[in-house]
Amino acid sequence: MSYLLKHILQPKLHAHIFRNWIKYVPFLLAGFCFSLTVRATAQSAIKMVKYDLRVLNMNIGELTVKQQTGANDLIIDAITDVKVKIIFTYEVRFLQHSLYRQGNLWSSHLQTFKNGQPNSDTWLSKKGETYLLIKDGDTTLIHDKITYSGSLIYFNEPTHDLFIYQEVDGGKKYLKYIGNQSFILTDNEGHKINKYVYKNGILDHAEIKHTLATIYMDRSTNVNNLP
């Protein structure tokens, strides 16, 4: 009887965890904003890369990132599709579009959809010397200079330790280099939150932690240079 109860209740437990955890996915996978020096190229180009996503020992989806570099503008589009079936099927899509102009973050738009329905909508736009953050109708001003956002984290390996700003809510955290082309993101108390590992300047693996679950992200394709 205990054996049967374990296999009946365990999926329900996983479903409960996932329902709570999925609410935080937009914050976990959304881009970060931070100021730093990066290895960049002035040559106009379009690059694309894909990542596999895993959580709770399950393959849950895919992240596709495209970066287009121009003379003065840098455009990044990221699409994340997550699908998990635990008693019920959960489908979540994240769309992020970021524009950088003359080295500064100009605007960013993050949309999330759950089972095909809008779940959240976040805008970040430059207004003079400040940024206006609008999340689901609530507005916040960010008084800071932002020259790099987490949208760039895939193709541009940081070159030193730095403070970072979360694009979705303006929260500030610290990114620390730990050697071997690896960085960890820490909270205000210095506790490790996330880990990012690079290979030849490209993000190769990431561990994005939360109290409910950890997302494992692994590069599944080589970098494709598009015409």
Image (cartoon, rainbow, N blue to C red):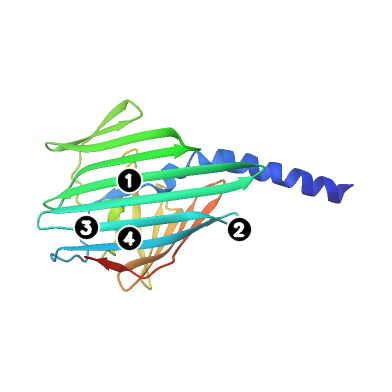
Question: Would residue 3 appear left or right of 141 to someone viewing this image?
Answer: right
The residues tagged by marks 2 and 3 sit, at their Cα atoms, a distance apart of: 33 Å
Marks 3 and 2: in contact by CB < 8 Å?
no
Which type of secondary structure does the marked residue at label 1 adopt?
Answer: strand
The residues tagged by marks 3 and 4 sit, at their Cα atoms, a distance apart of: 13 Å
Q: Which circle marks residue 65 in the picture?
A: none
Q: Which residue is mark 4?
A: 154
The residues tagged by marks 1 and 4 sit, at their Cα atoms, a distance apart of: 14 Å
- Disc 3 or 4, which lies upstream in sequence? 3
Q: Which circle marks residue 68 in the picture?
A: 3
Q: Quadrant of residue 109?
A: top left
Badge 4 amino acid: Tyr
Question: Would residue 86 appear left or right of 65 to someone viewing this image?
Answer: right
Badge 1 amino acid: Gln
Q: Which circle marks residue 57 in the picture?
A: 2
The outermost residue toward the top is 137
Which type of secondary structure does the marked residue at label 4 adopt?
Answer: helix
- Disc 3 or 1, which lies upstream in sequence? 3
Q: Is residue 204 above or below residue 148?
A: below
The outermost residue toward the right is 1
Instruction: Give the crowd class for mark 3: few <14, some 14-19, many >=20 residues within 10 Å.
Output: some
Q: Position of residue 16 (x, y in %)?
A: 64, 39
The residues tagged by marks 3 and 1 sit, at their Cα atoms, a distance apart of: 14 Å
Instruction: Give the crowd class for mark 4: few <14, some 14-19, many >=20 residues within 10 Å.
Output: many
- Residue under the point 25% across and 47% down: 98
Q: Quadrant of residue 137?
A: top left
Q: Is residue 140 visible?
A: yes
Which type of secondary structure does the marked residue at label 3 adopt?
Answer: strand
The residues tagged by marks 2 and 1 sit, at their Cα atoms, a distance apart of: 26 Å
